[in-house]
Amino acid sequence: AHRLGGDQLFAGLMVGSVPVGAIIGITMCSLSLRRITFKSLVTVLSVGTIFGNVLYALAGLMQFKFTLLAARFLIGLLNGYSLPSKYIGLTVGMKRRSEVILYYSAANTLGYAAGPALAALLEYFIKSVRIHNLVLDSDTVPGWCMALVSSVFLVLVVLLFEDMPMKVTAPSAVHRAAHSGDRIPVVAVCAAFWHLCVSSAVLTAVEVYIVNLGQQHWGWSIARSAWLLAALMFCSGMINMGLGALTRRFIKSDRYGLLGGSLFGSVACVFLFDFGTTSVAIQVVLLCIGLLLLLTVAGMGRGFGLAIQSKLVPTSLKGKSNDWSTVFMSIGRGVGGVIGSALNPSSFFFVMLALFAASILVCAVSHARMKPSAKAD
């Protein structure tokens, strides 16, 4: 963005364009599923995502900064953010849904680990082979790489994706809800939305905060901070993957999972406190322990939040509840980016502790109401 003449405001617009596009895309996907099959929608979105990434990669050739903004908005609009959890909610039974969604949440976290690591590797490769032109350089290679990844995903969707019958998302299924007297339990669902929003905010805040902290307080390069972030995300993702397998045996209720995660997150914030030590090594060790615990708890909160929101409502309202869940997750990502960029070592502890303390309060107030609906499946 800076190379094409963009300032800090424009860079902020670029960051914000993805969640804005994602929120609009949630409504677009919901309406589209009434007329086309799930597989057809995913295929169309994949083609659009390829176009968005190619457009991003060609911004240097076009020498027009608003190309970047348009590309980022398209990528957000067409990423199908609400579809994975909706597909799981419609195809996986209630007994194993929490387990499967935790796997999905862990896969998301592993994706956050792969992103910074892949970006650093691509930058190193481009600089080592000394490629630098308007079409391919260290700024445009992420776009080309993601276009290739999206192309591979498109092939896998065509060959392997198991589609659902149209009757599951057809208009008739939506109209039946209006005559069935089904209602959304407002308090319980809002509590689930809160946990999803906070989890997403914590994940994004950690992403932004650790890069800023590494540069401004430790004198690290962006690449070095990105490698640390990738390592933390990878460890967190693997832990969450293991927790998914344990959930089926040891955690029988999603609401207890949310309460336990909030309590554990509050305790983990101790490692984020600014003890005033001047040793960078000690700061890094304490922060890594605290952030790893926070990332793990946030991944759990996202998983249990997505699972319970699909169980709180009758089957006819499951799709609407899922759409709103992803909207609040997108809001959380936007808010988390602002929080992460604004905080410093003195304030980070207090803000994170306040978020988890508020989540504990939400759990206490809504605990009795967060029970699966008798009409849920």
Image (cartoon, helix red, strand yellow):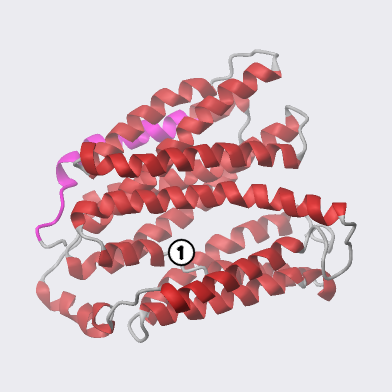
Is 232 a magenta residue? no
Q: Which residue corresponds to mark 1?
A: 81
Residue at the image point whose x is 48% and y is 70% from the top: 24
Percent position of residue 174, x then y: 23, 78
Q: Nearer the viewer, residue 106 or 263?
A: 106
Percent position of residue 332, x then y: 47, 50
Crowd rating for badge 1 (residues with CA inside 10 Å; few <14, some 14–19, many 20+): many
Q: Is residue 36 above or below residue 111?
A: below
Q: Is residue 326 above or below residue 210?
A: below
* Secondary structure type for disc 1: loop
Residue at the image point whose x is 38% and y is 47% from the top: 302
Residue at the image point whose x is 53% and y is 75% from the top: 154
Which residue ends up furthest to the bottom in the rendered image? Answer: 35
Which residue ends up furthest to the front in the rendered image? Answer: 159
Q: Is residue 275 left or right of residue 216?
A: left
Q: Is residue 332 visible?
A: no
Q: Quadrant of the N terminus?
A: bottom right
Is 357 a magenta residue? yes
Residue numbers of the magenta segment: 351-374
Prevailing secondary structure of the magenta residues: helix
Identify residue type, mark 1: Tyr
Percent position of residue 34, x then y: 32, 82
Q: Which quarter of the picture shows residue 31?
A: bottom left
Q: Which quarter of the picture shows residue 150?
A: bottom right
